[in-house]
Amino acid sequence: MALQAMWVPGYVAQVEIPGNTRLRLVNGIPWTDVTGLRVGYGAIFRGIGGQGNWFHFAIPSPVITDGKRVRLERVFVLYNADAGARVESAHIWDGPNNVRRYDGLSNTGAHGSGIDAKNSWAGGGGEVFWGIGVSIFVRFTNDANIHFTTAGGDFTS
């Protein structure tokens, strides 16, 4: 069984609901309530206290290798969440199909520089048909930053 790992930098993060009803400017920089602050080491978003938002990551997905469908073993989204920013859900998608849902999480703190139990989730080992996406829901209990550093997946064939 061959293992392939595919990763993207954190600055590919896409926010589901941009704008000043859910996000604030990062460091006062214009438009970062819409786009986040894209930097070489990831993307930083500043949430508004009492609000939540989804952040989406497209993971490069080898669908067929050596004539066989690959299987998704694990996904990763590395992040640093300030006090007041809490990762509550991680949903894994294969195109339009929900592969797995991890709800009821309450993850905060520094998880942006290495793989740990708070930033990695089993992918279920099912065959990949379309392309893997990972969606992360962050609840902001007060104005706080979430910084995504990288995201990826492990695939076997």
Image: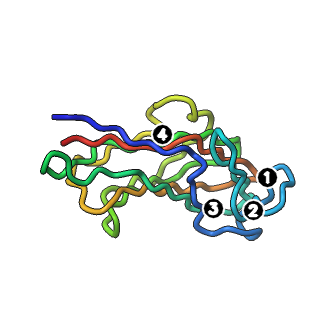
Name the colouring of the figure.
rainbow
The amino acid type of the residue labelled 3 equals: Gly
Instruction: Give coordinates of residue 94: x percent, y percent.
Output: 32, 61
When asked about the image quadrant of residue 154, the answer is top left
Looking at the rendered image, the disc whose residue lies closer to the viewer, 4 or 2, is 2
Mark 4 or mark 2: whose residue is earlier in sequence: 2
68 relative to 97, above or below = above
The amino acid type of the residue labelled 4 equals: Asn
Q: CA distance from mark 1 to mark 4?
A: 23 Å
Looking at the rendered image, the disc whose residue lies closer to the viewer, 1 or 4, is 1
Instruction: Give coordinates of residue 46: x percent, y percent.
Output: 73, 53
The amino acid type of the residue labelled 2 equals: Asp
Circle 3: element type: strand
Mark 2, other Cα within 10 Å: few <14 / some 14–19 / many ≥20: many
The amino acid type of the residue labelled 1 equals: Val
Residue position for label 3: 52
Q: Which mark is residue 119?
A: 4
61 relative to 120, above or below = below
Residue position for label 1: 26
Q: Residue at x 25, y 56 (%)?
A: 128
Looking at the rendered image, the disc whose residue lies closer to the viewer, 1 or 3, is 1
Q: Which mark is residue 33?
A: 2
Mark 1, other Cα within 10 Å: few <14 / some 14–19 / many ≥20: some
Looking at the rendered image, the disc whose residue lies closer to the viewer, 3 or 4, is 4
Looking at the rendered image, the disc whose residue lies closer to the viewer, 3 or 2, is 2
Q: CA distance from mark 3 to mark 2?
A: 13 Å
Q: CA distance from mark 2 to mark 1?
A: 7 Å
